[in-house]
Image (cartoon, rainbow, N blue to C red):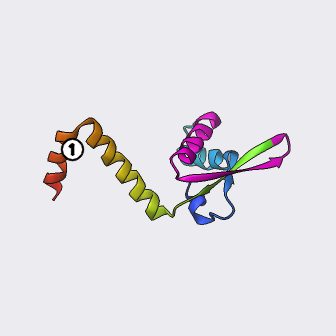
Amino acid sequence: MKALWDNPQKGQISREVHNQVNKRLSPGSISRASIINLLEDMVGMGVLSRTDTTGKGGYRGVYSSKMDESGFRKFVVKTAIEAFMRNFPEETRQALEKLS
């Protein structure tokens, strides 16, 4: 999804993201429905924005990044640490202390 950061004003539809992901996973693949679910989850988390546009066959979502790549990396780390603290508080504290 690097292209979402490369040109955030343009955005991408799920088909474009799906093609890029599967190109990187080759010879493996992931379903388009899984990509759409991930994109929608990221909209819900505030990472992406979605605008609807009309096209052949009806409406489609255009996804754009709401943060730059550095901001996204920080978001991922913060979200992971919060989940670890919620689920494994003592172990997380011990691990973080060892890193200091």
Between 58 and 45, the residue placed more toward the observer is 45
Label count reads 1
- Relative side of 58 to 97, left or right: right
> Was residue 90 drawn as part of the magenta stretch in this picture?
no
| Picture layout, residue 37 above or below residue 94 | above
Region rendered in magenta = 30-58
The image quarter in which residue 32 lies: top right
Which residue: 55% across, 48% down? Answer: 24
Q: Does the magenta stretch include residue 36?
A: yes
Q: Is residue 44 left or right of residue 88?
A: right
Q: In which quarter of the image is residue 85?
A: top left
Name which residue lies at 36% across and 53% down: 77
Image coordinates of residue 61 in percent, x first then y, are 71, 47
Q: Quadrant of residue 22?
A: top right
Q: Tell me the crowding category of disc 1: few under 14, some 14 to 19, or many 20 or more residues within 10 angstroms, Cα based.
A: some
Q: What element carries label 1?
A: helix
Q: Name the residue under label 1.
A: 92
User: Callout 1, which amino acid?
Assistant: Thr
Residue 94 pos. (x, y %): 14, 46
Estimate the x, y position of residue 71 in percent, counting from the top left: 45, 62
